[in-house]
Image (tube, helix red, strand yellow):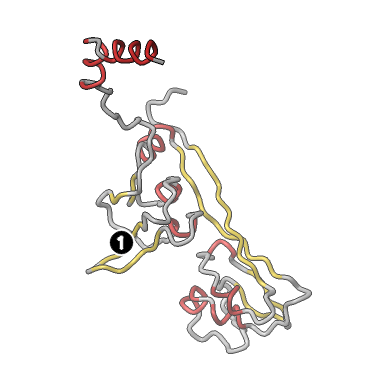
């Protein structure tokens, strides 16, 4: 026991050990180039397309609020998982995170968001609630009938012969108001993400 204690004391008293212990230095922390931080504004104007909210996989991580004379995306860091999808989906380059925008521009990639309207014919009663609740329909046809009837061929959907017919699925913004207003839960809105790549100038043949 005494020999062991003597060995430890002698070892710890060495100048080299004392110097390393009291003057230890570590390399400075450097943020990797590929690191994705919380999305930050680029200074470009938000056009209220809401693609950022539609694509976000984390509930409550982002919303778009009206401030002053325009719209502004707001990041809630307690919910954000820093995936960068909101940056990729925004068609106006309003947000940035790490090298996401730089990489997209260099590679000519983009993320497109669209929506698919599915109607369960076994559950649908043709009441027209979904048609009249749709905010896009209201903008297109201000005279939209209470039962979902419309003579305007530009609406997203309308009731024809007792059935809800989808005419322009591509106009759907994914707000899901039609889905929540359906009394029989017969309608569902599915989000579709599509990655595309376009030729880059100076990128060769």
> From what the image shows, is residue 124 above or below residue 147?
above
Residue 170 percent coordinates (x, y) = 56, 61
At a point 29% along the width and 51% down the height, the residue shown is 41
The residue where tag 1 is placed is 72
In-front residue for pair 190/162 = 190
Q: 194 or 199, which lies in front? A: 194
Q: Toward which corner of the image does residue 184 lie, by quadrant?
A: bottom right
Q: Is residue 10 above or below residue 57?
A: above
User: Compared to 6, does 57 lie above or below?
Assistant: below
Q: Residue placed at 35% from the left, 47% from the top?
A: 38
Q: Quadrant of residue 126?
A: bottom right
Query: Whole-percent x and y of residue 82?
Result: 41, 46
Residue occupying the far right of the picture: 122
Image quarter hosting the N terminus: top left
Q: Would you say 33 lies left or right of 198 here?
A: left
Say above or below: 65 vs 43.
below
Residue 152, quarter of the rendered image: bottom right
Q: Residue at x 48, y 60 (%)?
A: 59
Residue found at x 28% / y 57% = 45
- Tell me: 129 left or right of 85: right
What is the residue that sits farthest to the front in this orientation? 2
Please tell me how many numbered marks the rendered image carries.
Answer: 1
Query: Is disc 1 placed on a helix, strand or loop?
Result: strand
Position in image of residue 191 (x %, y %): 57, 58
């Amino acid at each position: 026991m005494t020999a062991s204690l003597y060995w430890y004391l002698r070892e710890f008293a060495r100048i080299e050990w004392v110097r390393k212990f009291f003057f230890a230095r570590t390399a400075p922390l450097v943020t990797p180039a590929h690191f994705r931080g919380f999305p930050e504004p680029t200074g470009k104007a938000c056009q209220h397309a809401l693609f950022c909210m539609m694509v976000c996989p984390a509930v409550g991580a982002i919303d778009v609020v009206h401030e002053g004379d325009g719209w502004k995306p707001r990041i809630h860091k307690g919910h954000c998982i820093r995936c960068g999808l909101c940056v990729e989906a925004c068609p106006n380059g309003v947000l940035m995170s790490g090298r996401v925008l730089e990489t997209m521009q260099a590679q000519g990639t983009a993320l497109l968001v669209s929506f698919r309207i599915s109607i369960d014919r076994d559950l649908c009663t043709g009441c027209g609630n979904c048609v009249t609740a749709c905010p896009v329909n209201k903008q297109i046809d201000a005279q939209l009938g209470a039962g979902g009837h419309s003579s305007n061929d530009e609406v997203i959907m309308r009731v024809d012969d007792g059935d809800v017919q989808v005419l322009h699925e591509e106009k759907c913004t994914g707000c899901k108001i039609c889905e929540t207003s359906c009394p029989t839960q017969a309608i569902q809105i599915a989000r579709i993400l599509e990655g595309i790549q376009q030729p880059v100038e100076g990128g060769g043949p």
